[in-house]
Image (cartoon, rainbow, N blue to C red):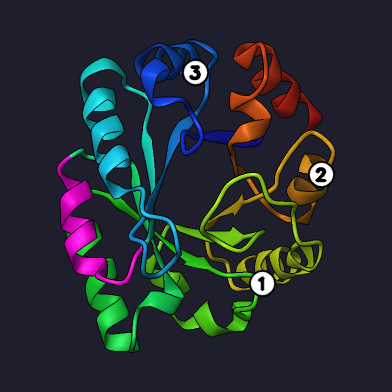
Amino acid sequence: MVEISTSILSIKKENAIKTLYNLETAKTDYFHIDVMDGKFVPNNTNDVMLEYCEYLSSITNVPLDVHLMVEDVEQYIKSYLVFEPNIITIHFEAVKNKEKLKEYVDLIKQNNCKVGISIKPDTKVEEIYEILPYIHMVLVMTVEPGKGGQKLIPETIEKIKTLKKYLDDNGLEVDIEADGGINSQNLKTLVDAGCNIVAIGTAITDSNDYKSEIQKLKELA
C-alpha cells in the first residue's frame, strides 16, 4: 500500500496546531516539510517550517519527511536534524559536485536519519544512478518545486518508470516518492509507475474530511 506524506505547506497558520492534530488522527504516514530558502526556489518558507517542526516535535510521533529546496544545503541539514526527522531529502541540482553530495549524504546518515535525493522535472534520472546505492529514497518532483497547487507534469511519470526499472534490475531497495500535483485522479498511475510514497498537499488539506480523503487515496492505490 502507498504511504501518504501530507504536505503542510498550505495550511493556515492560525489553525496550525489543530490542523496538525487532525492530520495525525487521520492517519497520515508522514508530515511533509517543504523548506524553501527564497534562492533555490522563489518562495521562503523556512521560518514557518521551523515553527511547525517545533510544534510537531512536542505533539506527535508521526515521522517528519523534510524536503530541502535550498542553496546552502549543509546549514539547512543541521537546522532540521535537531527535530530528529525520519528522512531529509536534498536536491541534486543544489550540490555542485559529486564529492560534496556524498559528504551531505554521509552527514545525514551519521545523525541516524535516512537520506533522500530529489530531482526536478528537467533533470534526467540517469544523473543520480551513481548515488543510489548510498541513499534511502529518490523524490521525483512531478511539478516545478517552489509552490503548491500546480498540475502534475505527465512526462515525469516515465521518469519514475525508468527509475523503478533501474532499481529492480540492480537489486537496490530505494523508496520512490512523487511530489507535486497529486490527487485521486492520478495517484494510481504514479503507484503503477513505481512510487510507494506520495507527497500530497492541497488535495488533503483543502478537503472537508482529512481521514476519509487519506483513506480514499490509499484505497485507490
Q: Residues within 10 Å of mark 3 (few under 14, many from 20)?
A: many
Of marks 1 and 3, the one in the foreground? 3
Residue drawn at the location 64% of the way across and 24% of the way down: 206
User: Where residue 53 appears, x then y in whole percent?
Assistant: 27, 33
**Residue nearer the viewer, 40 or 122:** 40
Discs 2/1, front: 2
Q: Secondary structure at mark 1?
A: helix
Measuring from the top left, give residue 12's x and y in whole percent: 46, 25
Q: Which quadrant: the N terminus? A: top right
Residue 30 or residue 165, whichever sits in front:
30
| Residue position for label 1 | 169
Q: Main secondary structure of the magenta part?
A: helix
Q: CA distance from mark 3 to mark 2?
A: 22 Å
In the depicted structure, whether residue 129 falls above or below residue 186: below
Which residue, given by chain and number where applicable, does mark 3 sit on?
23
Determine which residue is flagged by label 2. Answer: 186
Q: Residue at x 44, y 75 (%)?
A: 92
Q: Amino acid at mark 2?
A: Asn
Residue at the spot 48% in from the left edge and 28% down from the top edge: 11
Residue 139 part of the magenta-drawn span = no
* Location of residue 31 with respect to 105 vertically, above or below: above
Q: Earlier in the sequence, mark 2 or mark 1?
A: 1
Magenta region, residue range: 70-82
Instruction: Name which quarter of the figure residue 209 lies in.
Output: top right
* Residue 98 x, y percent position in the rendering: 34, 87
